[in-house]
Structure formats: structure tokens, C-alpha cells
Image (spheres, rainbow, N blue to C red):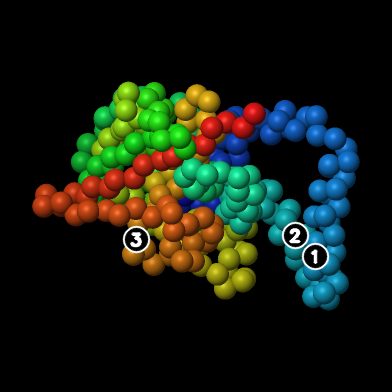
Amino acid sequence: MSTDTTSGTATAAASGASATERFHSDKSPFAAVANTPPARVDKLARRVLQAVHDTIREEKVSYDEYNALKAWLIQVGEDGEWPLFLDVWVEHVVEEVATDHREGSKGTIEGPYYVPNAPERGAKGTIPMRDGESGTPMVWSGQVTSTSGDPLGGAVVELWHADDEGFYSQFAPGIPEWNLRGTFTTDAEGRFEITTIRPAPYQIPTDGSCGRLIAAAGWHAWRPAHLHVKVSAPGHELLTAQLYFPGDEHNDDDIASAVKPELLLAPVDQPDGSVTVDYSFVLDPARS
């Protein structure tokens, strides 16, 4: 979620522009598939087009509907919302296919709001946040191990999440650059302890093309409250996940279809009003 720097209100244009710019700066998608054989490109392109053709034939799509789709696709690009559209409605299937071989912890989508190189906070530390940061204080303890059971000292846990109003730093004005974004490195036993706040649920921006699709289809735009993490260690596969809170009304109908039972936390209320959670990760060895 992001806000317009001029009005201070959440807008799809601001969010889309930020997400698109971040994608171009952080990812090198064309380099990663530069050597993809033409036969593979041909096969995938034909499969996608065939699925579109089949839908048109089976649903007897009219010219009016086709032109509405064409106009909408053009507007998605003009709004800069392709990262949002793809991450919300497509990425969860790519993640499912890409990780179906894993024996360790379950993962889920990255989403459009990851930023690399967040400040290092050690094995036990507090994520960067504003003085008096709104939200329920939370302490999260855990351990990173390999599927062999061995602890992974020096593993890296990158954490980022929305604030108590559903906004992400670097995608909303008026929030410090690294607010609620931190990097934590496990101790010799693979353990870590992170102090942060419990994030809020939020709606994805709805005033742009994605919002028009949501309204036209009669869907909702809500994502349940979640923590984003990337967990890495030498010789092991990178794990990207989101961790969720029980009882959230949108755990069962997340607009991004990213919630999995294995990713639910079990918060414990403390006498001082804070909560504690214990959640650990098991990483798969890198595939040869």
C-alpha cells in the first residue's frame, strides 16, 4: 500500500509507480532467462494464448467485452500496476510450482514491496521504527535449521512489514526510509529474537486499474495482517514467506491467495499488553 505524496492519501498511481521502479532496480528478469531456448518460449507463449482463446470461445466473448479488456490492459500499464496485478493474482501459483520439491518450511509470495539491504540488527535486536510507533509491541523468537536438523549460524532473516495503518516505508511519504525493515543474522545456534510491532491488515490500492477489476467482479481488496521474510544461508535455498495471525477475517479469502496453514503464527498475550511469537524456519539444501 502506498500514498500520494501530494495529497497524503493512498493511491494506486503512487503505489504502482513505486513498485514498478523498485522492480526495475532490484530484479534482472531478462538476464535470468537470456538463454531460454526458443522452443521453451514458443511453448509457453502458445499455452498462454491458447488459454485466452479457449476462454473467448467457451464464454462467447463479445467485441464490447474484448474492447473493454483491451482498454483495461492499456490502463494497467499506464497506471504502473503490472507488478501489483501479477503479484496479487499470479505469483502465488508461480511460487507453488517453484517450491513444490521442498521438504523444509513452506514459503509464499514476495509481493511488490521488498527492498534489499535493510539495516543489520544482529541476532537479537529491534527493527527500525519511529519513536512511539503505533501498534502492539511484539517479540518474535525463532531458530533457523537445515532439513538435516543442524542449526544454521550466520543465517540471514530479512523482515519487512506494514505499519499499524497498513503503510510500507519507501512506498508511502512521511515514513522514515527503513521503518519496519531490518536484517537479522542468527547466532551460532541459528537463533534470533526480533522486537517489532504487530502490523495491520490493509486493502491494496483500489483507485486504479486493479481496483476497477475488483469492483467490476464484486471482489474485496483486503490482505490479512502479515510479516514478510526472506531467510537465507550459504548452501541452502532462499526461503521467501509471509507469516499470518490467527483470527484475521481475511485469512480464508486473502485477495492475493497467499495464506497457508503452515504460515500461521501463535501469538501469546503478555501482561504488559505486548505479544510474543515463536516461529522457526527449516531451509532446504541448495539443489545441485
Residue 241 picture location, percent across and down = 47, 45
Q: Which residue, given by chain and number where applicable, does mark 1 sit on? A: 67
Marks 2 and 1, how far apart at CA: 6 Å
* Amino acid type, callout 2: Ala
Name the foreground residue: 192 vs 164.
Answer: 192
* Amino acid type, callout 3: Pro
Name the foreground residue: 227 vs 43.
Answer: 43
Q: Is residue 250 left or right of residue 129?
A: right
Marks 2 and 3, how far apart at CA: 40 Å
Residue 137 picture location, percent across and down = 22, 46
Residue 182 picture location, percent across and down = 37, 32
Q: Quadrant of residue 53?
A: bottom right
Callout 1: few (<14), some (14-19), or many (20+) C-alpha neighbours within 10 Å? few
Marks 1 and 3, how far apart at CA: 42 Å
Q: Tell me whether circle 2 and circle 1 mark residues in contact (CB < 8 Å).
A: yes
Q: Secondary structure at mark 1?
A: helix
Q: Which residue, given by chain and number where applicable, does mark 3 sit on? A: 246
Q: Secondary structure at mark 3?
A: loop
Q: Which residue, given by chain and number where applicable, does mark 2 sit on? A: 71
Q: What's the residue at 43%, 65% (across, down)?
A: 250
Q: Is residue 191 above or below residue 15?
A: above
